[in-house]
Amino acid sequence: MKQLNRALNIAVIGGGMIGLSTAIGLRQQGHHVYLIERGQQPQYSDEPELRVSALAHHSRDLLKQLGAWQQLPVERLGPYTGMHVWDQDSFGSIEFTAAEVAADDLGAIVENKVLEHVLWQQALTVGVQVIAGEAVVAHHHQDNQLVITLAGQRHLTVDYMIAADGAASPTRAREKLPLTYWNYEQTGIVAVVRTEHPHQGIARQVFLPTGPIAWLPLGDAQLVSIVWSADDAKAQELLAADERSFMNQLQAASDQCLGRLELASQRAAFPLKMQYAQRWVSGRLLVIGDAAHAIHPLAGQGANLGFGDVIALLRVFEAGVNPRTLRAWERQRKAAAVTMIGAMEGFKRGFSGSHPVLKLIRGFGLRMGDRIPPLKRFLIQTALGETH
């Protein structure tokens, strides 16, 4: 990256993939960067992690630029070359492949902890000053700088502070940035499943009346990560069910596309909600990633939306950051987030319920998407992240 004439002091709050990527990119530009994370470096074991992200091409390109992608263990990556989406008990179905747009793949499934571990190492390598096991308890604006107070009463004075501290962002709350919020009244259930038939690098999604199930291919040809987004009442039933009952319901929903299924991990769950910060810039404080927006995992675009924030923000700091360029960044990224939130809400509403008329409309919609080339190309481009 281009080296700047004047190095800034910047604090990035939050050591997840978005915060770490921001810190590395800013450090590569020549800035002095603090990365403050209340936890320690993420670690992973030989077993697949439950939380994964489907990374589009623009996210992967950023990670390559940061020097992180090259360090990811190949056996923990699940590139996918095709997608298959269908509506349960309906004629509606759509399939597409990367080859249809002359691409090698549509993206890759990455285990979050594996990526965060590698990014943390890369942050240390490029010279980010990592402050782990420490929380920010206060911050205040002072002239053209920000003063940050850590739990241990250490003070840092910085030119900019970037909050990437998650959907429950304490930084956003302290700054009293207004939040638009609604509860999807759904729960996401995640698990790793072993399949009888190889997944063949195809990401699959089935729409049920109570919510969709995504089947995401992992590095092992017979392991998939599932994300079952179910209405809260159904989710509680699934979580209370024993393993056999849970797997019987998952097997029935699979249409036998992967043969016999076996649970290969514990089940975990998290509530699904949409939230959106109405302001992303407050003086020299910025919010990005989940601190700025959280969306339904329906299309797996949450991480890609966050990486889009990072890409655009790094361009601002590289070209010369000031209130005008930050406002332009905020407008651009808010527009991208609102578009994605609207699309996810439309999909969720359109594919919920089992009314015969709704199922007929969904079926025709999926069939048209499969048969009309311009519409199909648009859907593939969305999967590729080209509309981020």
Image (spheres, grey):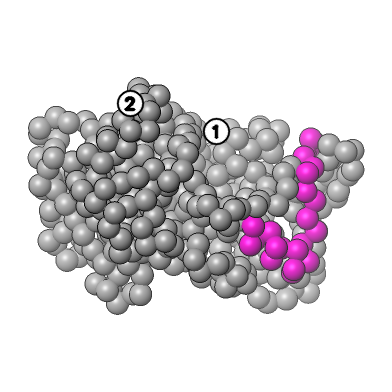
Q: Measured along the vertical axis of the image, is residue 152 above or below residue 367?
A: above
Whether 231 is among the magenta residues is no
Q: Amino acid at mark 2?
A: Lys
**Between marks 2 and 1 in the image, the one whose residue lies nearer the viewer:** 2
First reached walking from the N terminus: tag 2 or tag 1: 1
Q: In this image, 81 relative to 181: left or right?
A: left
Task: Report x, y in % for residue 264.
Answer: 43, 46
The residue that appears at 78% across and 74% down in the rendered structure is 5
Judged from the image, the secondary structure of the residue bearing numbered disc 2 is helix
The residue that appears at 46% across and 43% down in the rendered structure is 265
Question: What is the magenta range?
Answer: 117-139
Q: Which residue is label 1 attached to?
A: 179
Q: Which residue is label 2 attached to?
A: 234
Q: Measured along the vertical axis of the image, is residue 44 above or below residue 30?
A: above
Q: Which mark is residue 98?
A: none
Quarter of the figure with the N terminus: bottom right
Task: Report x, y in % for residue 282.
Answer: 67, 44
Q: In this image, 100 relative to 124: left or right?
A: left
> How far apart are labels 2 and 1 at the CA level?
28 Å
Task: Report x, y in % for residue 8.
Answer: 79, 62
The residue that appears at 24% across and 56% down in the rendered structure is 84
Give the quadrant of residue 228.
top left
- Total marks shown come to 2
Closer to us: 114 or 334: 114
Whether 128 is among the magenta residues is yes
Quarter of the figure with the C terminus: bottom left
The residue that appears at 69% across and 66% down in the rendered structure is 122
Give the quadrant of residue 219.
bottom left
